[in-house]
Amino acid sequence: MTRTNDLGRDPIGPLLLRLAVPTMTAQLVNALYNIVDRIYIGQIPETGALALTALGVCFPVLMLVAALAALIGIGGGARAAIHLGEENRARAARILGSCALALFLLAVFFTVLLQLLRVKLLYLFGASGDTIGYADSYLHVYLYGSVFVLFSLGLNAFISAQGFTRVSMATVLLGAVCNIILDPILIYGFGMGVSGAALATVLSQAVSAIWVIVFLCGSRTKIRLSRRDLRLDWACLAPVLALGVSPFVMQSSESLLNIAFNVSLQRYGGDLAGGAMTIASSVTQIGWMLLQGLTQGAQ
């Protein structure tokens, strides 16, 4: 945590290793959020198979939230890093403030819109009469915590952009550990089922979001999140969106592909086929999360 990476002067090889290993670890642990939920939900007596399928139906929405975080976070982190390289910390801080407010407004809009259209969208995404209850219970709770997800994912990019990749890794680790602890307590201990899994994820992401905000408001950060910079500065946001649109399109396209899988599997294979796809996607997610972590470290 105390090692400072000098992005302008350190040798490239060792620097890449120090930056990429934590980001790869963070991405791998980030995949555990969904995998742990699926492990516990799949073990629910009698209804586990249907509940697991329902979670797969909700997954495109979760991917879309991550895509929105990438739109602002990856683009904003890159632009902030450029201005840090120019020794222009004031400009980097303005980008941070604009992105933080943009993430909050996106979260509010996204939550209200999807809560109103929740059931219709779930049927459109491949839910059946047997799985809609479980999917609706999970998504209803999860959407209220989308602001924490956007903050923890989106603002964490600004920590990585400064070279504090171990701190950004700790953000993900902290949330993952909380999720692993809370899942069995809420799912089985309180008998909340899929709603408990969603609540565990929301609370864990809230802890991560608080960690990120406290760091960005603290003394170690090179660019500080301050109230005066919390405004939509379109001169700052336009380049951010231009850089962030690429990862947003890639991740949202994955969401659309997942919807196509769910709908086709439901039509031709039924609920159990959808559950099998949910399990398979957990395995493939591990591989591409590692590669994404490597590219983030390089960036």
Image (cartoon, rainbow, N blue to C red):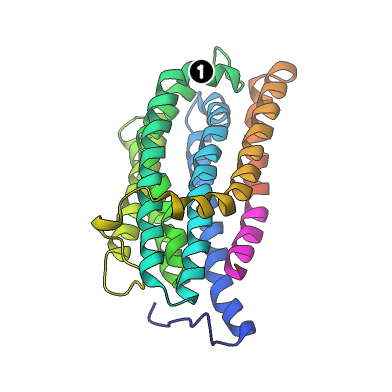
* Quarter of the figure with the N terminus: bottom left
Q: Position of residue 268 (x, y in %)?
A: 75, 18
Question: Badge 1 is on which residue?
Answer: 132
Magenta stretch, overall SS: helix
Seen as rendered, the residue at the extreme top is 129
In the image, what residue occupies the spot 54% across and 38% down? 64
Q: Which residues are magenta?
A: 286-298
Seen as rendered, the residue at the extreme right is 268
In the image, what residue occupies the spot 38% across and 81% down? 2
In the image, what residue occupies the spot 58% across and 51% down? 242
In the image, what residue occupies the spot 33% across and 41% down? 185
Whether residue 292 appears in magenta in the rendering, the answer is yes
Around disc 1, counting alpha carbons within 10 Å, would you say few (fewer than 14), some (14 to 19), or many (20 or more)? many
Position of 46 relative to 279 (above/below):
above
Q: Position of residue 200 (x, y in %)?
A: 37, 41
Position of 20 relative to 8 (above/below):
above
Q: Position of residue 10 (x, y in %)?
A: 55, 87
Any part of residue 280 in sight: yes
In the picture, measured across the screen, residue 55 lies left or right of residue 202, that is right
Closest to the observer: 161 or 210? 161
Position of 17 relative to 259 (above/below):
below
